[in-house]
Image: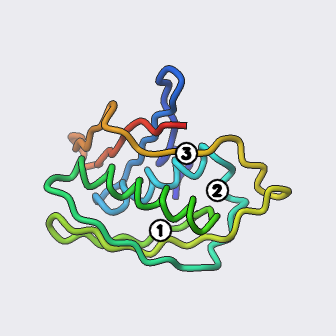
Amino acid sequence: MAQSDCEHFAHGADIGVRGRGQTLAEAFANAALAMTAVITDPDLVRADTPIDIACRAPDEELLLVDWLNALVYEMATRRMLFSRFEIALEGSRLTAKAYGEAVDRTRHHPAVEVKGATMTALAVTRGPGGEITAQCVVDV
């Protein structure tokens, strides 16, 4: 995964996350990685434990929000961070495995807690070269 495939963008008090990829699944995975990077360096998170996630939404943009919020839920309830994602998309349904580990405050040094993905700046777009960008603002 290239360094430029996930990034943050400025948005007032919250933080925008953006993922790019040649497929929608890759763009969603990179958006999730950008969300992890809001909290800690994803390179510090071991991809030891797989967690199954499934969600459904009427369009790609709402599916992105549902996907990221499903990850926020898993992070909060399992006290985990995730650094690798395998995503399958079929129409309006997303199934995924998120790989991560329990939060280790001494190693991960979490900067903030992501409370949820929002509809602010929500977009899933396709560039002229076929690259897909998936983005939204997360509440921290």
Left/right placement of residue 98 relative to residue 123 reads right
Q: Is residue 52 above or below residue 24?
A: below
Mark 3, secondary structure of its residue? loop
Image coords of residue 131 (percent x, y): 29, 48
In the depicted structure, whether residue 63 falls above or below residue 114 = below
- Kind of residue indicated by mark 2: Pro
- Label 1: which residue? 85
**Residue positioned most to the top:** 12
Q: Amino acid at mark 1?
A: Phe
Residue 78 is situated, as x and y percent measured from the top left of the image, at 59, 69
Q: Residue furthest right?
A: 106
Q: Earlier in the sequence, mark 2 or mark 3?
A: 2
Q: Residue at x 41, y 61 (%)?
A: 70
Q: Residue at x 63, y 65 (%)?
A: 80
Apparent side of residue 115 relative to residue 137 in the rendered image (left or right): right
Q: Which residue is mark 2?
A: 42
Image quarter in which the C terminus is found:
top right
Asked which secondary structure carries label 2, the reply is helix
